[in-house]
Amino acid sequence: MDVSGHYKYFAIKKRKGGLRRIMAPYGDLRDIQIWIKVNILDKIEQPKYVTAFAKGRSTAKNARIHEGKKYILKVDIANFFESINVRFVYRAFCRIGYENGVSSWLANLCTSRLDDFKYDQLKEQKEVQILFDELKLKKEPFLIQGAPTSPALANIVCQRMDRRIMGLANKLGFNYSRYADDMTFSSDDMVNLPKVGLIKRIVESEGFHLKNEKTELLHKGNRQIVTGLLIDRCVRVPGRYKRDIKRHIHFCLKYGGREHFSRIAPGLAFGKEWLNGRIQYVNSIEPETAKKLWSDFNKIDWGY
């Protein structure tokens, strides 16, 4: 079964600059994948240290595992989804309980190779096409970043790796969590943290690789951020994020919501919804802080 022609290729901007490649399934395939996600994958319970792509999990729950710890070690898995090939996905469905033929069929619906024709169509956007170059080298179908089934499948594929690291955590006495490709380790005693070389050996034996440039060791007194949240003393949203919200609210009150966003971001059609979403994020972490933001937000004249 070849579904490679049923994806569109594009890029989105990363939060910290640069572009992220995306392969997103078209209508019929997407509907099938959503069915698989809802009726099969979402029913698989994930342990508490897996903090992404599961009901009730969030960046805040991930950060709270490490709240107030003196030492934080962070590592990042490179090309997380694309490192998982169709054989890993097939074995994941087998572990869930499906027989071999059904597991093979499901795995092929949830993975894909790079389609040569679709890749060639990107030649007019050379900057985007370059992002897909390394995927051309993959001979086997792989898990697609942008497919509804990929996050939950990645969690299932990582189960053995996570259990191995948790066994180490119980032995050495450190805290562990994984939010997608972000792995975090924490302890009040430096000697309890695992060595990066040991983590690397475990990760590589499971078919993944680390981004060496993303490895960080944070000490008490440093600016300790885990999945975008400050964790020293208590989990909270970084001040810069909140100040940015206040700045937008200030100018919305001064000029009107539509006028403000048409000035600073003409392409941002949903300024009200965007700002509302940012306040909701603060509310999920710091409800008391969000009260004042909501109060000022509700005073904005949006012109409709």
Image (spheres, rainbow, N blue to C red):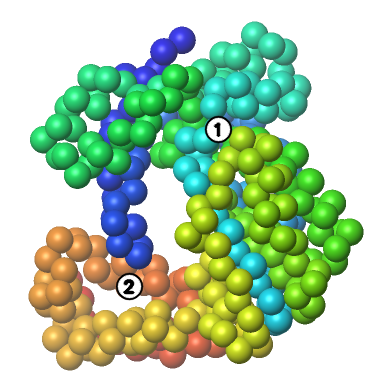
Q: Residue at x 25, y 39 (%)?
A: 130
Q: Earlier in the sequence, mark 1 or mark 2?
A: 1
Against 254, residue 167 (above or below) is above
Q: Nearer the viewer, residue 138 or 95?
A: 138
Q: Nearer the viewer, residue 181 or 197?
A: 197
| Residue 223 in view (yes/no) | yes
Where is residue 117 drawn, in percent x and y? 23, 19
Residue linked to disc 2: 275
Q: How many marks?
A: 2
Classify mark 1: helix, strand or loop: loop
Q: Please give left or right for residue 33 compared with residue 271 in the image.
A: right
Residue 135, image quadrant:
top left
Crowding near the residue tagged with mark 1, few <14, some 14–19, many ≥20 C-alpha atoms within 10 Å: many
Residue linked to disc 1: 84
User: The C terminus appears in which quarter of the rendering?
Assistant: bottom left
Against 91, residue 42 (above or below) is below
Q: Residue at x 50, y 70 (%)?
A: 228
Q: Please give left or right for residue 281 compared with residue 160 in the image.
A: left
Against 270, residue 251 (above or below) is below
